[in-house]
Amino acid sequence: MVAPVLILLGPPGAGKGTQARMLEDDFGLVQLSTGDMLRAAAQAGSPAGRTAGSVMDAGRLVSDDIVTAVLAERLEGLKDRGIVLDGYPRTTPQAAALDGLLARQGRQVTAAVNLEVDDAAMVERISGRFTCATCGEGYHDRFKPPARAGACDKCGGTAFRRRADDKAETVRDRLAAYHAQTAPLIAFYQARGQLQRVDAMGTIAAIRTALSRIVGAVVG
Ligand code: AMP
């Protein structure tokens, strides 16, 4: 069987990263987050990484060429693995580039799932979130605090980090970039008969259940 390729669509804060990590656990998919890849590149401090870092801090999209190159490198060697793309594609040219990269691996997009949310709720969701600095587990001040304050539920780590671009001002710019450049992808995948929708305003567990039903049907 050809290894499946799932895309998670939705604005910043919709829960793409959280749900993608759960799909890794539930279905053995590999999460590919271009945001994580770009943050790692920015931290490594290469010239391209530093450029990407300042664009990200401003809440804008990194250029299609840079992001696609970063993703292409990661995709190599994953031909036989099912993948869940979190944060890519984010523009129509990226969707076309993805088709090309997948064709080289003899596969295509299996399904794109749109996580549907209200903009107004996104600022609160994003500005409260943080992750364990050791294992990357995600938390939220209000919706998902660690069971024991100050310690990660998964690995016990005590250092946490918040993203530089999760400030309320930057979140508004990221939402604007989403509406201008990424939202058109919903119609793009709809026209190809590949779009599925999930109401992503509920709890993390409820969204996980709804998503699992869809993913179970397409991934088998
Ligand atoms: P994320 O972690 O998915 O919220 O991405 C954080 C930031 O990384 C975005 O606001 C963009 O600046 C950049 N980024 C991540 N993925 C892409 C992409 N596919 N295209 C352009 N920029 C991206």
Image (cartoon, helix red, strand yellow):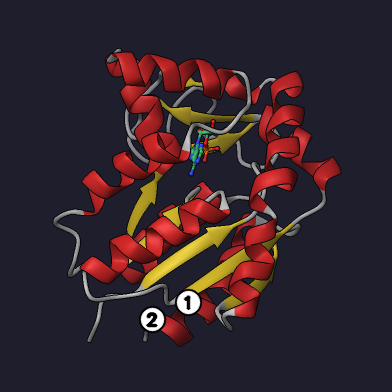
Q: Does any portion of residue 163 appear in the rendered image?
A: no
50 on left or right of 72: right
Give amino acid for label 1: Val
Query: Is 87 above or below relative to 43?
Result: below
Query: Is 166 above or below relative to 108?
Result: above
In the drawing, what numbered circle is on residue 219? 2
The answer to whether marks 2 and 1 mark residues whose Cβ atoms lie closer than 8 Å is yes
Q: Residues within 10 Å of mark 1 (few under 14, many from 20)?
A: many
CA gap, disc 2 and disc 1:
6 Å
Q: Which residue is painted at 39% across and 59% down in the image? A: 98
Q: Quadrant of the N terminus?
A: bottom left
Q: Quadrant of the C terminus?
A: bottom left
Q: Nearer the viewer, residue 207 or 46?
A: 46
Mark 2 CB within 8 Å of ligand 1? no
Q: Secondary structure at mark 1?
A: helix
Q: Which residue is painted at 45% across and 36% down in the image? A: 35
Q: Nearer the viewer, residue 42 or 140?
A: 42
Q: Position of residue 126 (x, y in %)?
A: 67, 34
